[in-house]
Amino acid sequence: MVINIAGEAIQRDGGQGADDILKRLKKVNALALKSAEGYLFDISSLAELAGVKDAAEFTAVTIDSPEGLAICRHSVSHIMAHVVKDLYPAAKVTIGPSTEDGFYYDFDIDTPFTPDDLSAIEKAMQRLIKKNNPFVRKTMSKADAIKLFQAMGEGYKVEIIEAIEADEVSLYEEGGFIDLCRGPHVPGTASVRAFKLLKTAGAYWRGDEKNKMLQRIYGTAFATQEDLKRHLEFLEEVKRRDHRRLGKELDLFSIHDDIGAGLILWHPSGAMIRKTIEDFWREEHIKADYKLLYTPHIAKIDLWKKSGHLDFYKENMYTPMDIDGADYEIKPMNCPFHIAIYKSALRSYRDLPIKYAELGTVYRYERSGVLHGLLRVRGFTQDDAHIFCRIDQIESEILDVLDFTLFVLRTFGFEKYDVYLSTRPDKYVGTLDNWEVATEALRKALQKKGLKYETDPGEGVFYGPKIDIKVKDSLNRQWQCSTIQVDFNLPERFDVTYRASDDKEHMPIMIHRALMGSLERFFGILIEHYGGAFPLWLAPVQVSVLTISERQAEFAKETAAALMKANIRVETDYGDEKIGYKIRQSSLKKIPYAVLIGDKEMESRSLTVRKRNGENVVFADMNNLLDFLREEIEGRR
């Protein structure tokens, strides 16, 4: 058996050299071993592995690797469960996995955890970690494990074990605390270097709202205190940029229980930003030869049966309503309406491609537990479009859509993104030839654009392959926004055709595409991306006009009128408060520019402008200021 430790390959002959290897593993703070096939093992499995895998190769896994960090975090979740059981013996343990940036554990406990509880749990965990209790793996028959956890009163563990198909399960013991787990774990609790408990939340058992509500504790762990500090600072910045907090502070939107969860009210400032986004969207789509549509919010239920939505999306659709003896359904998507408009006239191959676009509001049922501000809602407006084209036009249309998508994303300030190509799943409709042509067209378009992409095998939708573009915001977080999907299913279901050059009817290909996704979600992402400090072209109020005293009120009114005449969005304050207070209020509203008017400006008719960053700039007159503002607005900066 060969073990690679810190780049050095060490040969172990049978049972010899175990102590030396363990010392070397301890020296590099190894947490586990990784096989050439990618399987992870506890370091304590060394002797066992040597006996059955003499020719195998293993690599030492350290905490500064993704696998090592995940192992550490999972071990910390066990340590936390151990402490919770010590402090709250009546609590029942359920599951406690590691996550992308931390860990959590769910507990069945009558009283929700408080911040003081978290502090007490964290201190107890620190004491336990210092003891360096080893994590010891044990195997047990399924039947014996059920008896063990039944005797412990841990019914959730019994339920988990009963669902396991294997005859044998693995358990881990640490300091007398036993938990069901596949592992691996760190060698001992002292391997944990830096951790923090973050918050609590409610969570349904198995994610099903029909089950009991559990209490979840979230935490995180890192290789070093420095890494932990950076992550906590990042979380503070995320909190500062939270669109729900900023939405309230800047009076952008609200959600009201008496109206309904997941239903957004756009306030004047938020509505002004939305109007600006929509105006840009419509202008650019008209330039790109899209035809704009408006479609109803409901349709007869037979339409959704024909489209397949009633089969594939029924759980996300609302209860039908009876109108004049017929069942109608509120729309979850816009596609069938666009198809109906396409079919309202005979189409020739010369007409294709036909490109329809709509800012269409749709409604989907989302469980209350997943609703999240603007990011997960029940009523939202898609920037939806459908392109009907011949199969030989797919590649060129995809190229155009990619150009359009990247232009739109960059206009809104998103310069970084990841691209994914999702291919045919196991269950699909259409012919293999069509799938191959469509997938290759998507691939070639990405290659021609020079876009780096990852392939997601089998992750296409049932009706065709797709491209997903996930933007990265100013905090380098990834957000799914743009999608381009090729569809063979709906044209076939609705018998969509065009007259080809051979004078026969052929089925067009339908391309679904969204550049921003939903306006609600995109707006939430924008709020967090900019931290509420929108660029001038998007800002709901672009300039505030502030007087130093009431003497300048008339000149200030004249200034504001000139700005408004030039279509600049203006807010004014001519009151008798001190100028420092007025500037502060303008700053809190994150208004890009404030025109400060005192006696000097009134006499010279010059304009002192304070930028959002606190810098003052003097403009000789209104024309100079307007030229400056127009250049920035037209450049969408």
Image (spheres, helix red, strand yellow):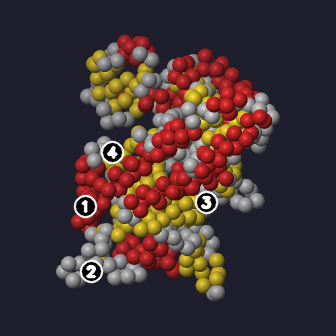
Residue beneath disc 1: 436
Instruction: Determine which residue is flagged by label 2.
Output: 499
Q: Residue furthest front?
A: 603
On residue 378, the disc is 3
Q: Nearer the viewer, residue 496 or 559?
A: 559
The percent coordinates of residue 325 (x first, y second) are 63, 87
What residue do we see at 70% from left, 30% from top? Answer: 598
Which mark is in front, 2 or 3?
A: 2
Q: Of the residues tagged 1 and 2, which is closer to the observer? A: 2
Three-letter amino acid code at the position of disc 2? Arg
The amino acid sitting under disc 3 is Arg
What crowding class fits label 3: few (fewer than 14 Cα within 10 Å), some (14-19), or many (20 or more)? many
Q: CA distance from mark 1 to mark 2?
A: 24 Å
Q: Earlier in the sequence, mark 3 or mark 1?
A: 3
Crowding at mark 1 (Cα within 10 Å: few <14, some 14-19, many 20+): some
Residue 454 marker: 4
Q: Quadrant of residue 346?
A: bottom left
Q: Position of residue 208 (x, y in %)?
A: 62, 55
Measure how far apart labels 1 and 4 are at the Cα level. Answer: 18 Å
The residue closer to the viewer here, 426 or 544, is: 544
Which residue is at 45% across, 43% downward?
635
View extreme (bottom): residue: 325
